[in-house]
Image: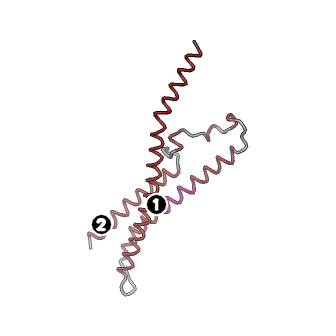
Amino acid sequence: MSDDNGDLREREIEGAQGFLKPRLEFAERLYSQAMNSLWLGNAGAALATLSFIGAAWKDGTFPKTLLTPLAFFLAGLISMGVGTLLALMRVRAVIVRNQGAEWPWEFIVGDVQSPAERVGLSPRDWRTIMALCSGGFFVVGCLAGFILLACR
């Protein structure tokens, strides 16, 4: 009877994992798309702002207020770069700490991630933290640019 309970429990776990797997894969695709969008959005906005500054440049001067949205877009790019660098450094540290393990029980428990953490859905993930900052910088930069143009 205990074997039947063990088999039933194993099937229940497999069923739960089967339910979770496609959602994790979908979340991973969305996360990757969001990251790429933040990189491209901030870079494109910074480039557009620089182009606008270049077009508005007359007699060696330009509207210095345009530096405000540019600063926000550049801060968004920098935060994405910092988040990526910190995430890479963390992954490297985990690999270095655990590369000598020969058995599963030799891995450091704190380095084991849940499925949600593996796809970046964790408040401890530097990519996520810095991506939130980058998104905020992008929104504020867009608002600042719009306000500056509307007030001219």
Q: Quadrant of the N terminus?
A: top right
Main secondary structure found in the magenta portion: helix
Report which quarter residue 54 is drawn in: bottom left
Residue at numbered disc 1: 39
Pick the residue in front: 148 or 21: 21
The location of residue 74, given as percent across then percent down, is 46, 66
Residue placed furthest toward the top = 1
Identify the element where label 2 is drawn: helix
Q: Quadrant of the C terminus?
A: bottom left
* Side (left or right) of 11 relative to 143: right
Up the image or down, 50 lies above or below 143; here it is below
Up the image or down, 146 lies above or below 4; here it is below
Residue range of the region highlighted in magenta in the rendering: 77-85
* Side (left or right) of 104 relative to 41: right
> Mark 1: few, some, or many residues within 10 Å (few <14, many ≥20)?
many
* Side (left or right) of 114 relative to 34: right
Pick the residue in front: 61 or 23: 23
The location of residue 116, given as percent across then percent down, is 50, 41
